[in-house]
């Protein structure tokens, strides 16, 4: 494993929220590394293929990546673009209820991803 690969993993392990490529580049720069963007994308693609991380589409303009963990959803601040994770227990079974309702309409859900949009506490002030 290269130094860059170790630092990419460290970035994900130290983050409590999904990371964009610009955020990863900023982290790596602080660690004294300056990888070419193509090299970073190649490493991310490999990590996705190896099921270490997953690519998530939260915003139409930005792809985010995060460690592959238990299924959860996200909230995106429309102003600062901060992404927050919403755990399954915060949803109170709402998504399961929706999937069940769709099944009764002869629709077989094969997956879902919920994103709530709004303003984080810092941007509300």
Image (cartoon, grey):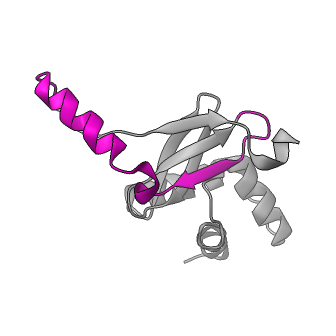
Along the viewing direction, whichever of 40 and 15 lies nearer the viewer: 15
Decide: is 75 above or below 103.
below
Residue for point 39% across, 63% down: 70
Find out whether residue 104 is within the magenta segment. Answer: yes
**Relative to 25, is 68 on the left or the right?**
left
- Locate residue 92, reporting x and y percent: 38, 51
Along the viewing direction, whichever of 2 and 23 lies nearer the viewer: 23
Residue for point 21% across, 28% down: 102
**Relative to 43, is 121 on the left or the right?**
right
- Locate residue 61, reporting x and y percent: 65, 29
Along the viewing direction, whichever of 27 and 99 lies nearer the viewer: 99
Find out whether residue 12 is within the magenta segment. Answer: no
The quadrant in which residue 112 appears is top left
**Relative to 73, is 10 on the left or the right?**
right
Decide: is 63 above or below 31.
above
Can I make out residue 61 in this image? yes
Image quarter where the C terminus lies is top right
The quadrant in which residue 100 appears is top left
Q: How many marks?
A: 0
Image quarter where the N terminus lies is bottom right
Q: Which residues are magenta?
A: 78-107
- Locate residue 69, reporting x and y percent: 42, 64
Decide: is 85 above or below 61.
below
In the orientation shown, which residue stands out farthest toward the top?
Answer: 105
- Locate residue 46, reporting x and y percent: 46, 58
Can I make out residue 34 in this image? no
Residue for point 26% across, 39% down: 97
């Amino acid at each position: 494993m290269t130094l860059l690969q170790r630092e990419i993993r460290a970035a994900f392990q130290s983050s409590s929220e999904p990371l964009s490529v610009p955020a990863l580049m900023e982290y790596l720069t602080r660690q004294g590394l300056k990888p070419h963007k193509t090299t970073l994308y190649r490493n991310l693609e490999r990590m996705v293929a190896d099921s270490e991380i997953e690519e998530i589409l939260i915003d139409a303009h930005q792809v985010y990546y995060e460690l592959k963990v238990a299924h959860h959803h996200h909230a995106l601040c429309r102003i600062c673009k901060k992404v927050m994770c919403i755990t399954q227990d915060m949803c109170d079974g709402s998504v399961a209820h929706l999937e069940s309702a769709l099944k009764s309409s002869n629709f077989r859900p094969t997956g879902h991803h919920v994103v709530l949009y709004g303003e984080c506490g810092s941007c509300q002030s």
